[in-house]
Image (spheres, rainbow, N blue to C red):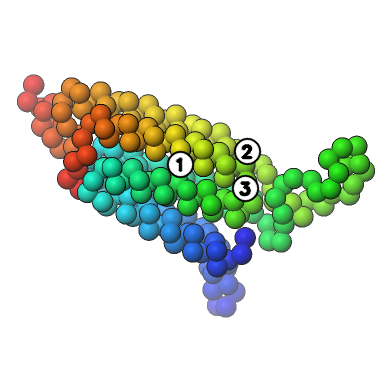
Amino acid sequence: MPELLDLIVDKYNYWLYIVLMMIGLYAMIGKNNLIKKLVGMNIFQTAIILFYVSIGYKKGATIPIIQGDHGHGAADAVIKAADYINPLPHVLMLTAIVVSVATFGVAMALCVKIYQRYQTLEEDELRMRLSEK
Amino acid sequence: MSWPIDLVILTFVIFCAIAAISVRDLLGTAILFGAYSFMMCLLWAVMGAVDVAFTEASVGAGVSTVFFVAAVFRTSRRTKD
């Protein structure tokens, strides 16, 4: 039982990542305003990025830049992988951030066009307008 | 990553997320969402992902907030929920 408790307390990043993800999912499904739904989508994406960055983290390690001489001396230096945080999840998430901003921009542009046509951003009012025609 | 700083920032992140989706003014949502992004950026700097942190600070908190505020001014600040 104490081992299980230790596991739960030790991995608090993952629990809070699940909480953030569920906040985003709720906003995407439960909110009526289209822009609120977009904010939920972005919260969901950042929660996934948090999960990946948490995977790469190591206790007692430093940022993934080789210490000391960056010139020719660095080739002979002994490098222990345990001393550096894993940079692979970071580079994967770098592209995810750029993609999320691109989707956010396109979605905002679509929201502006919807507002110009229907004068509302509420989902129920939009449904009413669409069923009138 | 020292756990007190990490836990404080994570709490702020969750507060900002809940506030951003529950406030009834879309401009308020924009500002709270910017605060959320900055807190996320701080969290990644603490966790050692510095490249992700400065990309998030410039792209996530900067450009996203500008898009958001521009979209809110072109539409309406009113929201029902």
Question: Which residue has dot 3 on it?
Answer: B49
On the image, the x and y values in percent for residue A93 come to: 56, 40
User: Which residue is label 2 attached to?
Assistant: A91
Horizontal and vertical percent for residue B38? 47, 48
Note whether residue A51 is visible.
Answer: no
| Amino acid tagged 3 | Ala
Could you tell me which residue is drawn at 23 percent across and 31 percent down? Answer: B75
Disc 1 residue type?
Ala
Pointer 1 residue: B61
Q: In this picture, is A114 found above or below A123? A: above
- Is A13 situated above or below B75? below
Q: Is B5 positioned to the left or the right of A85 in the image?
A: left
Quadrant of the rendering where the N terminus of chain A is positioned = bottom right
**B77 or A47: nearer the eye?**
B77
Residue type at mark 2 is Val
Give the CA distance from mark 3 to mark 1: 16 Å
- Residue B6 quadrant: bottom right
Q: Secondary structure at mark 3?
A: loop
What subunit carries mark 3? B
Is there one chain holding both mark 1 and mark 2? no
